[in-house]
Image: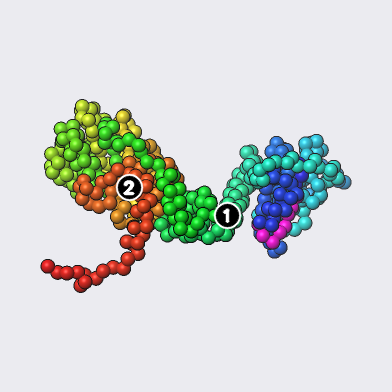
Amino acid sequence: MKIKRFVAADMRTALRMVRAEHGPDAVILSNRRTEEGVEIVAASNYDEDAVQRALIEAQRASEPAPAPAAPTPAAAPAPAPHDFAAAMAAALATPTARAVSVLPPEVVMAHPAAPAGPAPAASAPAPEPAPPAASPAPTLAAVPAPVAPADDEQLRAMREELAQMRAMIEREMHRLTDERLRGSPVRLAAMELMEDYGFDAGITRDIVLELPADTPMHRGRGLMLGLISRRLPVCPVDPLEAGGVIALVGPTGAGKTTTIAKLAARFVAEHGPRDIALVTTDTSRIGGREQLYGYGRQLGIAVHEADSDAALIQLLQRLQDYRLVLVDTAGLGQRDRALANQLNWLRAARNVSTLLVLPANSHFADLDEVVRRFGPARPQGVVLTKVDETGRLGSALSVVVDHQLPLTWVTDGQRVPEDLHRANAASLVLRLEDLRRAADKPNIPEADHAVA
Protein backbone atom coordinates (compact mmCIF):
# COMPACT_ATOMS: atom_id res chain seq x y z
CA MET A 1 0.00 0.00 0.00
CA LYS A 2 1.33 3.43 -0.99
CA ILE A 3 0.11 6.57 0.75
CA LYS A 4 1.00 10.08 -0.38
CA ARG A 5 0.05 13.67 0.41
CA PHE A 6 -1.05 16.01 -2.40
CA VAL A 7 -1.35 19.81 -2.14
CA ALA A 8 -2.95 21.92 -4.88
CA ALA A 9 -4.68 25.26 -5.33
CA ASP A 10 -8.16 23.73 -5.71
CA MET A 11 -9.96 20.40 -5.33
CA ARG A 12 -10.10 19.67 -9.06
CA THR A 13 -6.32 20.00 -9.46
CA ALA A 14 -5.72 17.88 -6.36
CA LEU A 15 -7.99 15.10 -7.65
CA ARG A 16 -6.20 15.20 -11.00
CA MET A 17 -2.85 14.78 -9.19
CA VAL A 18 -4.27 11.82 -7.26
CA ARG A 19 -5.41 10.13 -10.46
CA ALA A 20 -2.04 10.73 -12.14
CA GLU A 21 -0.07 9.34 -9.18
CA HIS A 22 -2.24 6.48 -7.90
CA GLY A 23 -4.47 5.69 -10.84
CA PRO A 24 -8.26 5.22 -10.88
CA ASP A 25 -8.29 2.84 -7.87
CA ALA A 26 -7.02 5.46 -5.46
CA VAL A 27 -8.56 5.66 -1.99
CA ILE A 28 -8.87 9.06 -0.30
CA LEU A 29 -7.90 8.91 3.38
CA SER A 30 -8.34 12.55 4.41
CA ASN A 31 -8.66 16.08 3.09
CA ARG A 32 -8.39 19.57 4.52
CA ARG A 33 -7.91 23.17 3.48
CA THR A 34 -4.45 24.69 3.99
CA GLU A 35 -2.75 28.00 3.26
CA GLU A 36 -1.58 26.58 -0.08
CA GLY A 37 -5.10 25.50 -1.03
CA VAL A 38 -6.38 21.94 -0.60
CA GLU A 39 -4.55 18.96 0.90
CA ILE A 40 -5.58 15.37 0.06
CA VAL A 41 -4.05 12.20 1.48
CA ALA A 42 -4.65 9.24 -0.86
CA ALA A 43 -3.53 5.64 -1.03
CA SER A 44 -3.21 2.97 -3.70
CA ASN A 45 -3.52 -0.78 -3.20
CA TYR A 46 -5.55 -0.01 -0.09
CA ASP A 47 -5.60 -2.82 2.47
CA GLU A 48 -8.33 -2.32 5.09
CA ASP A 49 -7.03 -5.16 7.29
CA ALA A 50 -3.62 -3.52 7.44
CA VAL A 51 -5.19 -0.22 8.47
CA GLN A 52 -7.25 -1.97 11.17
CA ARG A 53 -4.17 -3.64 12.59
CA ALA A 54 -2.31 -0.34 12.38
CA LEU A 55 -4.99 1.43 14.41
CA ILE A 56 -4.98 -1.31 17.05
CA GLU A 57 -1.17 -1.16 17.31
CA ALA A 58 -1.29 2.64 17.54
CA GLN A 59 -3.92 2.46 20.25
CA ARG A 60 -1.84 0.03 22.26
CA ALA A 61 1.25 2.18 21.81
CA SER A 62 -0.59 5.25 23.08
CA GLU A 63 -1.83 3.54 26.27
CA PRO A 64 0.37 4.01 29.38
CA ALA A 65 2.45 0.97 30.28
CA PRO A 66 1.64 -0.76 33.61
CA ALA A 67 5.28 -0.68 34.75
CA PRO A 68 8.26 1.43 33.68
CA ALA A 69 10.45 -0.29 31.10
CA ALA A 70 13.97 0.37 29.89
CA PRO A 71 14.02 2.90 27.05
CA THR A 72 14.84 1.62 23.59
CA PRO A 73 17.29 3.64 21.49
CA ALA A 74 15.17 3.39 18.33
CA ALA A 75 11.82 4.07 20.02
CA ALA A 76 9.72 6.76 18.38
CA PRO A 77 7.39 9.06 20.37
CA ALA A 78 3.81 7.76 20.60
CA PRO A 79 1.41 9.63 18.34
CA ALA A 80 -1.46 11.65 19.74
CA PRO A 81 -4.79 9.76 19.96
CA HIS A 82 -6.46 12.20 17.56
CA ASP A 83 -3.64 12.12 14.98
CA PHE A 84 -5.09 9.39 12.80
CA ALA A 85 -2.58 9.60 9.95
CA ALA A 86 0.48 9.75 12.22
CA ALA A 87 -0.82 6.90 14.37
CA MET A 88 -1.43 4.77 11.30
CA ALA A 89 2.03 5.54 9.94
CA ALA A 90 3.74 4.70 13.21
CA ALA A 91 1.81 1.47 13.62
CA LEU A 92 2.41 0.34 10.05
CA ALA A 93 6.10 0.93 10.57
CA THR A 94 6.23 -1.71 13.35
CA PRO A 95 7.67 -5.16 12.48
CA THR A 96 4.25 -6.84 12.76
CA ALA A 97 2.72 -4.54 10.15
CA ARG A 98 5.78 -4.32 7.90
CA ALA A 99 5.02 -7.74 6.47
CA VAL A 100 1.70 -6.41 5.16
CA SER A 101 2.52 -2.89 4.08
CA VAL A 102 5.37 -0.35 4.33
CA LEU A 103 4.86 3.39 4.18
CA PRO A 104 7.20 5.63 2.15
CA PRO A 105 8.72 8.58 4.04
CA GLU A 106 6.47 11.18 2.35
CA VAL A 107 3.27 9.65 3.74
CA VAL A 108 3.49 11.10 7.25
CA MET A 109 1.26 14.13 7.64
CA ALA A 110 -1.00 15.81 10.20
CA HIS A 111 -4.66 14.83 10.48
CA PRO A 112 -7.07 17.60 9.52
CA ALA A 113 -8.39 17.79 13.06
CA ALA A 114 -4.88 18.27 14.53
CA PRO A 115 -2.65 21.41 14.18
CA ALA A 116 -0.19 21.28 11.33
CA GLY A 117 3.34 20.41 12.39
CA PRO A 118 6.19 17.93 11.90
CA ALA A 119 5.10 14.32 12.09
CA PRO A 120 7.22 11.26 12.95
CA ALA A 121 8.83 9.58 9.95
CA ALA A 122 8.66 5.88 9.14
CA SER A 123 11.26 3.79 10.98
CA ALA A 124 12.35 1.70 7.96
CA PRO A 125 13.15 2.55 4.35
CA ALA A 126 10.36 1.69 1.97
CA PRO A 127 10.84 -0.71 -0.95
CA GLU A 128 9.67 0.33 -4.39
CA PRO A 129 5.82 0.04 -4.35
CA ALA A 130 4.05 -1.97 -7.03
CA PRO A 131 2.45 0.12 -9.80
CA PRO A 132 -1.32 0.61 -9.37
CA ALA A 133 -3.63 -1.59 -11.42
CA ALA A 134 -5.20 0.10 -14.42
CA SER A 135 -8.95 0.34 -14.75
CA PRO A 136 -11.11 1.59 -17.62
CA ALA A 137 -13.46 3.59 -15.37
CA PRO A 138 -11.71 6.57 -13.67
CA THR A 139 -13.46 6.64 -10.31
CA LEU A 140 -12.30 7.48 -6.80
CA ALA A 141 -13.55 5.29 -3.96
CA ALA A 142 -14.09 6.67 -0.47
CA VAL A 143 -12.30 4.89 2.34
CA PRO A 144 -14.69 2.87 4.56
CA ALA A 145 -14.88 3.88 8.20
CA PRO A 146 -12.91 1.65 10.59
CA VAL A 147 -15.19 -0.76 12.37
CA ALA A 148 -13.56 -1.18 15.73
CA PRO A 149 -11.38 1.66 17.02
CA ALA A 150 -11.31 1.87 20.78
CA ASP A 151 -12.01 5.59 20.97
CA ASP A 152 -15.67 6.44 20.19
CA GLU A 153 -14.81 10.10 19.85
CA GLN A 154 -12.17 9.28 17.25
CA LEU A 155 -14.69 7.12 15.35
CA ARG A 156 -17.24 9.95 15.28
CA ALA A 157 -14.61 12.40 14.09
CA MET A 158 -13.58 10.08 11.29
CA ARG A 159 -17.17 9.56 10.19
CA GLU A 160 -17.81 13.30 10.14
CA GLU A 161 -14.64 13.84 8.12
CA LEU A 162 -15.64 11.18 5.58
CA ALA A 163 -19.13 12.67 5.27
CA GLN A 164 -17.68 16.16 4.70
CA MET A 165 -15.22 14.80 2.16
CA ARG A 166 -17.98 13.00 0.26
CA ALA A 167 -20.18 16.11 0.24
CA MET A 168 -17.24 18.20 -1.01
CA ILE A 169 -16.52 15.80 -3.86
CA GLU A 170 -20.21 15.63 -4.83
CA ARG A 171 -20.49 19.43 -4.86
CA GLU A 172 -17.35 19.65 -7.00
CA MET A 173 -18.61 17.04 -9.46
CA HIS A 174 -22.02 18.74 -9.70
CA ARG A 175 -20.33 22.07 -10.34
CA LEU A 176 -18.23 20.56 -13.10
CA THR A 177 -21.33 18.95 -14.61
CA ASP A 178 -23.23 22.25 -14.53
CA GLU A 179 -20.33 24.03 -16.21
CA ARG A 180 -20.28 21.40 -18.94
CA LEU A 181 -24.05 21.66 -19.44
CA ARG A 182 -23.93 25.43 -19.70
CA GLY A 183 -21.51 25.09 -22.60
CA SER A 184 -24.45 24.08 -24.83
CA PRO A 185 -27.04 26.81 -25.53
CA VAL A 186 -29.97 24.38 -25.80
CA ARG A 187 -28.99 22.65 -22.56
CA LEU A 188 -28.58 25.98 -20.80
CA ALA A 189 -32.06 27.06 -21.92
CA ALA A 190 -33.57 23.75 -20.79
CA MET A 191 -31.86 23.99 -17.40
CA GLU A 192 -33.14 27.52 -16.79
CA LEU A 193 -36.65 26.53 -17.88
CA MET A 194 -36.78 23.51 -15.57
CA GLU A 195 -35.59 25.69 -12.69
CA ASP A 196 -38.44 28.11 -13.45
CA TYR A 197 -40.89 25.20 -13.38
CA GLY A 198 -39.65 24.31 -9.87
CA PHE A 199 -37.84 21.04 -10.61
CA ASP A 200 -35.20 19.81 -8.19
CA ALA A 201 -31.55 20.25 -9.18
CA GLY A 202 -30.98 16.50 -9.35
CA ILE A 203 -33.72 15.67 -11.85
CA THR A 204 -32.92 18.86 -13.78
CA ARG A 205 -29.33 17.72 -14.25
CA ASP A 206 -30.40 14.22 -15.28
CA ILE A 207 -32.92 15.46 -17.85
CA VAL A 208 -30.59 18.04 -19.38
CA LEU A 209 -27.78 15.49 -19.68
CA GLU A 210 -30.09 13.33 -21.83
CA LEU A 211 -30.72 16.28 -24.13
CA PRO A 212 -28.32 16.10 -27.13
CA ALA A 213 -26.00 19.11 -27.17
CA ASP A 214 -26.58 19.71 -30.90
CA THR A 215 -30.39 19.86 -30.61
CA PRO A 216 -31.88 22.87 -32.43
CA MET A 217 -33.18 25.55 -30.09
CA HIS A 218 -36.74 25.38 -31.42
CA ARG A 219 -36.92 21.67 -30.56
CA GLY A 220 -35.24 21.86 -27.15
CA ARG A 221 -38.34 22.54 -25.04
CA GLY A 222 -40.45 19.82 -26.67
CA LEU A 223 -37.73 17.23 -26.29
CA MET A 224 -37.19 18.26 -22.67
CA LEU A 225 -40.91 17.86 -21.89
CA GLY A 226 -40.89 14.45 -23.53
CA LEU A 227 -37.97 13.32 -21.35
CA ILE A 228 -39.78 14.53 -18.22
CA SER A 229 -42.98 12.76 -19.27
CA ARG A 230 -41.14 9.45 -19.70
CA ARG A 231 -39.82 9.66 -16.13
CA LEU A 232 -43.19 10.28 -14.46
CA PRO A 233 -44.61 7.08 -12.93
CA VAL A 234 -48.36 6.75 -13.58
CA CYS A 235 -50.58 3.98 -12.16
CA PRO A 236 -51.89 1.99 -15.14
CA VAL A 237 -54.97 0.74 -13.24
CA ASP A 238 -57.77 2.93 -11.88
CA PRO A 239 -58.03 2.04 -8.15
CA LEU A 240 -61.74 2.86 -8.24
CA GLU A 241 -62.31 0.09 -10.75
CA ALA A 242 -60.14 -2.30 -8.76
CA GLY A 243 -62.29 -1.66 -5.65
CA GLY A 244 -61.52 -2.86 -2.13
CA VAL A 245 -60.59 -0.71 0.85
CA ILE A 246 -58.67 2.46 -0.02
CA ALA A 247 -57.32 4.73 2.73
CA LEU A 248 -56.16 8.26 1.99
CA VAL A 249 -53.30 9.56 4.16
CA GLY A 250 -51.47 12.85 4.09
CA PRO A 251 -50.61 16.01 6.04
CA THR A 252 -53.06 18.55 7.38
CA GLY A 253 -54.77 20.58 4.68
CA ALA A 254 -53.74 18.32 1.81
CA GLY A 255 -57.38 17.89 0.73
CA LYS A 256 -58.07 14.29 1.73
CA THR A 257 -61.76 14.73 2.65
CA THR A 258 -62.59 16.71 -0.49
CA THR A 259 -60.72 14.18 -2.61
CA ILE A 260 -62.70 11.32 -1.04
CA ALA A 261 -65.93 13.16 -1.86
CA LYS A 262 -64.81 13.52 -5.49
CA LEU A 263 -63.87 9.82 -5.70
CA ALA A 264 -67.16 8.78 -4.14
CA ALA A 265 -69.16 11.01 -6.48
CA ARG A 266 -67.30 9.57 -9.48
CA PHE A 267 -68.02 6.01 -8.31
CA VAL A 268 -71.70 6.76 -7.58
CA ALA A 269 -72.16 8.24 -11.06
CA GLU A 270 -70.96 4.99 -12.62
CA HIS A 271 -72.08 2.26 -10.18
CA GLY A 272 -74.66 3.79 -7.82
CA PRO A 273 -74.49 4.47 -4.06
CA ARG A 274 -75.30 0.95 -2.84
CA ASP A 275 -71.81 -0.52 -3.44
CA ILE A 276 -69.76 2.14 -1.64
CA ALA A 277 -69.23 3.12 2.01
CA LEU A 278 -67.25 5.90 3.67
CA VAL A 279 -65.24 5.57 6.89
CA THR A 280 -63.63 8.35 8.92
CA THR A 281 -60.99 8.00 11.63
CA ASP A 282 -60.92 11.77 12.23
CA THR A 283 -63.08 11.71 15.36
CA SER A 284 -61.18 14.20 17.52
CA ARG A 285 -60.76 17.23 15.25
CA ILE A 286 -63.63 19.72 15.34
CA GLY A 287 -65.53 19.70 12.07
CA GLY A 288 -63.51 16.85 10.58
CA ARG A 289 -66.18 14.17 10.45
CA GLU A 290 -69.04 16.63 9.90
CA GLN A 291 -67.64 17.52 6.50
CA LEU A 292 -67.59 13.87 5.41
CA TYR A 293 -71.10 13.33 6.80
CA GLY A 294 -72.28 16.27 4.69
CA TYR A 295 -70.83 14.76 1.53
CA GLY A 296 -72.36 11.40 2.44
CA ARG A 297 -75.84 12.90 2.76
CA GLN A 298 -75.53 14.65 -0.60
CA LEU A 299 -74.46 11.46 -2.36
CA GLY A 300 -76.72 9.07 -0.42
CA ILE A 301 -73.75 7.10 0.99
CA ALA A 302 -73.50 5.67 4.50
CA VAL A 303 -70.69 7.12 6.66
CA HIS A 304 -69.11 5.17 9.55
CA GLU A 305 -66.65 6.09 12.31
CA ALA A 306 -63.68 4.27 13.87
CA ASP A 307 -61.84 5.68 16.87
CA SER A 308 -59.28 2.89 17.42
CA ASP A 309 -57.44 0.19 15.51
CA ALA A 310 -59.73 -2.52 16.91
CA ALA A 311 -62.83 -0.53 15.95
CA LEU A 312 -61.45 -0.03 12.44
CA ILE A 313 -60.78 -3.76 12.00
CA GLN A 314 -64.28 -4.69 13.18
CA LEU A 315 -65.87 -2.03 10.99
CA LEU A 316 -64.02 -3.17 7.87
CA GLN A 317 -65.12 -6.74 8.53
CA ARG A 318 -68.75 -5.59 8.58
CA LEU A 319 -68.25 -3.66 5.35
CA GLN A 320 -66.44 -6.40 3.47
CA ASP A 321 -69.44 -6.97 1.14
CA TYR A 322 -69.16 -3.45 -0.27
CA ARG A 323 -67.37 -3.13 -3.57
CA LEU A 324 -65.52 0.04 -2.50
CA VAL A 325 -64.74 1.43 0.96
CA LEU A 326 -62.99 4.80 1.21
CA VAL A 327 -61.23 5.61 4.52
CA ASP A 328 -60.62 9.25 5.45
CA THR A 329 -57.76 9.46 7.98
CA ALA A 330 -57.14 12.30 10.40
CA GLY A 331 -55.12 15.21 9.10
CA LEU A 332 -51.83 15.16 11.02
CA GLY A 333 -48.61 17.04 10.43
CA GLN A 334 -45.66 14.98 9.28
CA ARG A 335 -43.91 15.62 12.61
CA ASP A 336 -46.95 14.99 14.82
CA ARG A 337 -46.26 12.30 17.42
CA ALA A 338 -49.74 10.87 16.89
CA LEU A 339 -48.90 10.09 13.26
CA ALA A 340 -47.21 6.78 14.10
CA ASN A 341 -50.29 5.60 15.98
CA GLN A 342 -52.53 6.56 13.06
CA LEU A 343 -50.38 4.61 10.61
CA ASN A 344 -50.35 1.60 12.91
CA TRP A 345 -54.15 1.42 12.60
CA LEU A 346 -53.86 0.96 8.86
CA ARG A 347 -51.12 -1.63 9.15
CA ALA A 348 -53.20 -3.62 11.67
CA ALA A 349 -56.14 -3.69 9.25
CA ARG A 350 -55.42 -6.12 6.45
CA ASN A 351 -56.21 -5.73 2.75
CA VAL A 352 -56.11 -1.92 2.90
CA SER A 353 -54.60 -0.02 -0.03
CA THR A 354 -53.04 3.31 0.93
CA LEU A 355 -52.80 6.41 -1.24
CA LEU A 356 -50.72 9.42 -0.22
CA VAL A 357 -52.30 12.83 -0.82
CA LEU A 358 -49.70 15.47 -1.71
CA PRO A 359 -50.55 19.17 -2.14
CA ALA A 360 -48.81 20.44 -5.27
CA ASN A 361 -48.46 23.97 -3.85
CA SER A 362 -45.77 22.93 -1.32
CA HIS A 363 -41.99 23.16 -1.52
CA PHE A 364 -39.87 20.23 -2.72
CA ALA A 365 -38.16 19.74 0.64
CA ASP A 366 -41.47 19.76 2.53
CA LEU A 367 -43.05 17.25 0.15
CA ASP A 368 -39.99 15.03 0.35
CA GLU A 369 -40.26 15.03 4.15
CA VAL A 370 -43.97 14.16 3.93
CA VAL A 371 -43.21 11.12 1.75
CA ARG A 372 -40.52 9.95 4.16
CA ARG A 373 -42.68 10.44 7.28
CA PHE A 374 -45.65 8.62 5.75
CA GLY A 375 -43.44 5.85 4.42
CA PRO A 376 -44.52 3.32 7.12
CA ALA A 377 -48.03 3.39 5.58
CA ARG A 378 -46.52 1.87 2.41
CA PRO A 379 -48.54 4.01 -0.04
CA GLN A 380 -49.21 2.34 -3.38
CA GLY A 381 -49.72 5.63 -5.18
CA VAL A 382 -50.11 9.40 -4.98
CA VAL A 383 -53.06 11.75 -5.38
CA LEU A 384 -51.77 15.17 -6.43
CA THR A 385 -54.07 17.92 -5.15
CA LYS A 386 -54.24 21.72 -5.51
CA VAL A 387 -52.54 21.72 -8.89
CA ASP A 388 -54.39 24.94 -9.74
CA GLU A 389 -52.84 26.68 -6.71
CA THR A 390 -49.19 26.41 -7.76
CA GLY A 391 -47.04 27.93 -10.46
CA ARG A 392 -44.13 25.57 -9.80
CA LEU A 393 -45.58 22.12 -10.41
CA GLY A 394 -42.07 20.76 -10.94
CA SER A 395 -41.49 20.49 -7.18
CA ALA A 396 -44.25 17.92 -6.70
CA LEU A 397 -43.32 16.05 -9.88
CA SER A 398 -39.69 15.87 -8.72
CA VAL A 399 -40.74 14.21 -5.46
CA VAL A 400 -42.90 11.71 -7.34
CA VAL A 401 -39.98 10.84 -9.64
CA ASP A 402 -37.45 10.59 -6.80
CA HIS A 403 -39.58 8.19 -4.76
CA GLN A 404 -41.14 6.43 -7.77
CA LEU A 405 -44.68 6.69 -6.40
CA PRO A 406 -47.24 6.14 -9.19
CA LEU A 407 -49.65 9.00 -9.81
CA THR A 408 -53.31 7.94 -9.65
CA TRP A 409 -55.45 11.12 -9.69
CA VAL A 410 -54.96 14.86 -10.00
CA THR A 411 -57.28 17.52 -8.57
CA ASP A 412 -57.31 21.16 -9.64
CA GLY A 413 -60.29 22.78 -7.92
CA GLN A 414 -63.08 22.42 -5.35
CA ARG A 415 -65.88 21.20 -7.64
CA VAL A 416 -67.14 17.69 -6.91
CA PRO A 417 -66.40 15.64 -8.97
CA GLU A 418 -65.56 17.80 -12.02
CA ASP A 419 -62.10 18.77 -10.71
CA LEU A 420 -60.89 15.17 -10.36
CA HIS A 421 -58.87 13.71 -13.26
CA ARG A 422 -56.97 10.51 -13.90
CA ALA A 423 -53.24 11.19 -13.89
CA ASN A 424 -51.66 11.55 -17.31
CA ALA A 425 -47.94 12.24 -17.72
CA ALA A 426 -48.25 14.13 -21.02
CA SER A 427 -51.07 16.31 -19.69
CA LEU A 428 -49.09 17.23 -16.58
CA VAL A 429 -45.94 18.33 -18.38
CA LEU A 430 -47.98 20.36 -20.86
CA ARG A 431 -49.50 22.31 -17.96
CA LEU A 432 -46.11 23.35 -16.59
CA GLU A 433 -45.88 26.47 -18.77
CA ASP A 434 -49.53 27.48 -18.32
CA LEU A 435 -49.30 27.23 -14.52
CA ARG A 436 -46.07 29.23 -14.44
CA ARG A 437 -47.53 32.01 -16.59
CA ALA A 438 -50.72 32.12 -14.54
CA ALA A 439 -48.69 32.48 -11.33
CA ASP A 440 -46.53 35.26 -12.79
CA LYS A 441 -49.49 37.35 -13.94
CA PRO A 442 -50.10 40.53 -11.92
CA ASN A 443 -53.14 40.71 -9.68
CA ILE A 444 -56.23 42.30 -11.20
CA PRO A 445 -57.77 44.93 -8.86
CA GLU A 446 -61.39 44.44 -7.93
CA ALA A 447 -62.18 47.86 -9.37
CA ASP A 448 -61.43 46.52 -12.86
CA HIS A 449 -64.13 43.88 -12.60
CA ALA A 450 -67.57 44.68 -13.91
CA VAL A 451 -70.16 44.96 -11.17
CA ALA A 452 -73.58 43.56 -11.98
SS label for mark 2: strand
- Dot 1 surroundings within 10 Å: few (below 14), some, or many (20 or more)? few
Q: Position of residue 195 (x, y in %)?
A: 45, 58
The earlier-in-sequence mark between 1 and 2 is 1
**Residue 177: mark:** 1
Q: Residue at the spot x=51%, y=54% of the render?
A: 215
- In front: label 1 or label 2: 1
Q: Quadrant of the C terminus?
A: bottom left
**Residue span colored magenta:** 4-11
The answer to whether residue 199 is left or right of residue 15 is left
Secondary element type, mark 1: helix
Amino acid type at image mark 1? Thr
Give residue 64's position: percent from left, percent from top. Answer: 73, 44
Residue 315 in percent (x, y) is at: 22, 31
Query: Tag on residue 384?
Result: 2
Question: Residue at coordinates 17% horizontally, 39% vertically from top-left?
Answer: 269
Instruction: Tell me the number on the disc at residue 59.
Output: none
Which of the 4 quarters of the picture holds residue 234? Answer: top left
| Residue 354 position (above or below residue 437) | above
Prevalent SS, magenta region = strand
In 3D space, how far apart are the residues under numbered discs 1 and 2 (Cα atoms)? 32 Å
Q: Is residue 333 left or right of residue 282?
A: right
Classify 378 as above or below 197: above
